[in-house]
Amino acid sequence: MTQSAWLAVIREPRQMTAMTSPHTVLEQQFGHKAFRPGQADIIDHIMSGRNVLAVMPTGAGKSLCYQVPSQLLDRPTVVVSPLVALMDNQAAGLRANGVPVACIHSGQSREENVAQWRDIASGRAKLVYLSPERLMTGRMLAAMKALDPALFVVDEAHCVSKWGPAFRPEYADLTRLRDMFPEARIAAFTATADDATRKDIAQRLFAGQGEVIVHGFDRPNLSLNVAPLTNRTQQLLGWMENQRGNSGIVYCLSRKNTEKYAQVLCDAGYKALPYHAGLSADVRFENQERFLAEPATIIVATIAFGMGIDKSDVRFVYHLNLPSSLEAYYQEIGRAGRDGAESETAMVYGLDDIRMRRQFISDDGSDADHQLREHKRLDALLGYCEAAQCRRQILMSYFGEDAPVCGNCDVCENPPVLIDVTDTATALFGAIEETGQRFGATHVIAVARGEETPRILQFNHDKVPSFGAADLPKPYFQGLLRQAVALQYIHVDMENYGRLELLPKALEVLQGGEAFMCKDPTVKKTKTKTTTRQRQIKSASLSSDDTDLLTRLKSLRMDFARELGKPAFVVFSDATLMDMVMKRPQTRDGMMDVSGVGPSKYERFGEAFLAEIAG
């Protein structure tokens, strides 16, 4: 389509929607009776013409904060979103609520994109979704100039900042919007941004001229647990014993392991499905929909899974490998317990995880400054993993918030005792120093333990003073080394094959001036007894009749979703189905009182769900 044709389309008459209040839009178009905490404040800022950066936890309802204003503003709203699937799902959800929306991306034909553009240009739709790459082309920007948007929305805004953990160069170009469209307000949203990243986003997108609203990072309903790696399979199965009957997500680092551990769980009697980018689109869609619709279903996934998934009753998130940063970890565990009910999170990690993460950073092709920031982020995550104080306090402090001792993490429930292991640490640090700081963990541990391996004999390392200085089990040394890395006594040099280098604090220990205190490196078996919190979760479960009805409603929702070719939450969210179970409406008025049921959704789905409830 030529630029002149685009401009001609823009000049078609625009239909305006009568002005009304945010609460009216919320109730009549989205079927909700009240805003969640923080939403109304953000909407007020946008409606008053101010730029906003909103940092809100996963599941806090970021989308409504710009979808509601889009229906009130007199000119279009442009939403910049990073993934085609996210755009399609958001658009499908809006259409199900009777909200006209345009969505333009490379996954659609030229004819489809032209038709979508006509909707936004004519005023039939007031909201359009675009990728950053599509928006920032010369032709699209020229068309936007004539369209004169009232609001630009930047979703996943942490991608804008080089200080962020997921910087995307194509997002950096969005910084031109403030100068090209001085009359438009800009609203940016993210779930993960520390103070430095927030300041950088606000400066880049609107030169600091706007509001930065941080709507609390704490998710007190999530328990936090971290354990050193001993055996991934045994630890996963041991921990899962308390999760039978629950839905959850197990995160792996590789595609291969998602399929391996999905099978491990299936063999142990769980309903588990793999999800990774290497599966066909049809298989990914089917597994996602089963996870959303079927009870007690577990998805074993890479981080490709989770963004934009609306499942409120995820009862656990388990990490089989170390995430990339505290930001990534927080976002991933945030997919549990979105309904506010008690939920569990757990992570296991070992030295190989640290080595692999360091390698990923070194191999990502970014500049030295960015790599340094990513290594520092990983250091912060390692410090969290090796915490000897309340994990929630450390996590909240990282995001700039204070928190009391939570009583809902493994450190609070079983406070570790720090012990003096200076002699063993001296043996380990000595082995690193005396072998020239040129070798990795396996070799230096073998030197300290006095193992006569071929490599040790080849380099005459059986002659160094530290050889055999501490006859302790290999897992003990691995645990001590893991803590020494996390506590920044030792650096893992990934550019030189993972060799270990001593940092100043380790040299102070070697020189006899400092003690080395840490948690007992002895690996203890994970107990699988049911905790008080887990007993409370089970006692708060639905009755058998309620569970049966919820299962039938989810099955009906799945039928509609398959017919539409869209995710199940486009029909109704889990929270809406749960409200139906609690209220058991029998009439149209009763159904309209259910949170998340508006006139449009009732017209499309309401009678069928009333019939299912009536039995």
Image: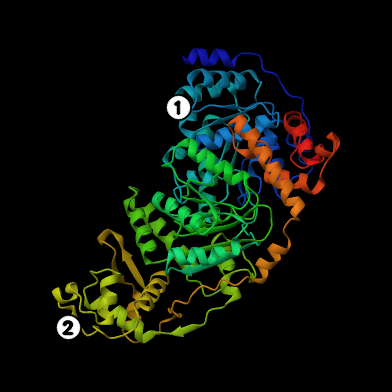
Mark 1 or mark 2, which is nearer to you? 2
Depth check, front residue: 132 or 96: 96
Residue 358 is situated, as x and y percent measured from the top left of the image, at: 35, 59
* Distance in Å between CA atoms under marks 1 and 2: 66 Å
Q: Is residue 451 left or right of residue 175?
A: left
Q: Is residue 498 left or right of residue 66?
A: left
Using the image, tell me which numbered label, if any, was put on residue 249.
Answer: none
How crowded pointer 1 is (Cα within 10 Å; few <14, some 14-19, many 20+) is rated as few
How crowded pointer 2 is (Cα within 10 Å; few <14, some 14-19, many 20+) is rated as few
Q: Is residue 166 left or right of residue 224?
A: left
- Residue 595, quarter of the rendered image: top right
Depth check, front residue: 48 or 219: 219
Which residue in the structure is indicated by mark 1?
137
118 to 177, vertically: above or below: above
- Residue 187, quarter of the rendered image: top right
495 to 452, vertically: above or below: above
Residue 280 is situated, as x and y percent measured from the top left of the image, at: 44, 37
- Residue 492, quarter of the rendered image: bottom left
* Amino acid beneath label 2: Lys
At a point 69% along the width and 56% down the height, the residue shown is: 340
Provide the secondary structure element on which disc 1 rests: loop
Residue 336 is situated, as x and y percent measured from the top left of the image, at: 60, 55
Provide the secondary structure element on which disc 2 rests: helix
Residue 101 in sight from this viewpoint: yes
* Amino acid beneath label 1: Thr
Depth check, front residue: 327 or 16: 327
At a point 23% along the width and 83% down the height, the residue shown is: 467
Which residue in the structure is indicated by mark 2?
463
